[in-house]
Amino acid sequence: MKNSFEDNLKKLEEIVTELEKGNVPLEDAIKKYTAAMELAKSCDTTLKDASAKVNKIVNEDGTLSDFDENQAE
């Protein structure tokens, strides 16, 4: 099962905290850094997908279209 955005973000924050302390052996630090980059990529993808969904509006006929800030005025 895929972890939630919140789970991935929490794990990413934990890894960053560990690495910032500076007492992680080099080999472990490299593994943790690699894992952190994968988590960051996953979080970024999730946020982009959510943003794309939020930026859609439902038209009167029930179809979806991109939200255009200029047309809202």
Image (spheres, rainbow, N blue to C red):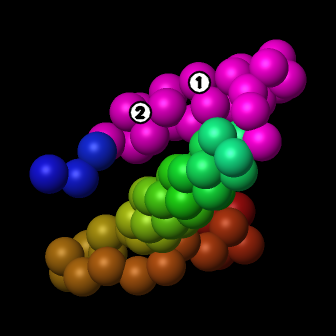
Q: Which amino acid does label 1 sit on?
A: Glu
Residue tagged 2: 6
- Residue in view at x 85 percent, y 23 percent: 22
Image coords of residue 18 (percent x, y): 69, 22
The answer to whether one can see residue 33 in this image is: no
> Is residue 41 placed above or below 12 in the rendered structure?
below
Q: What is the magenta range? A: 4-26
**Nearer-the-camera pick, 8 or 69:** 8
Quadrant placement of the C terminus: bottom right
SS label for mark 1: helix
Image coords of residue 23 (percent x, y): 79, 20
Image coords of residue 11 (percent x, y): 49, 32
- State which quadrant residue 28 falls in: top right
Other residues around mark 2 within 10 Å, as few (<14) / some (14–19) / many (≥20): few
The answer to whether one can see residue 58 in this image is: yes
* Circle count: 2
- Residue in view at x 44 percent, y 40 percent: 8
Q: Main secondary structure of the magenta part?
A: helix
SS label for mark 2: helix
Q: What residue type is labelled 2?
A: Glu
Is residue 51 in the magenta section?
Answer: no
Sequence-first tag of 2 and 1: 2
> Is residue 20 placed above or below 32 in the rendered structure?
above
Q: Distance between the residues labelled 2 and 1?
A: 12 Å
Q: Give me the disc on residue 14.
A: 1
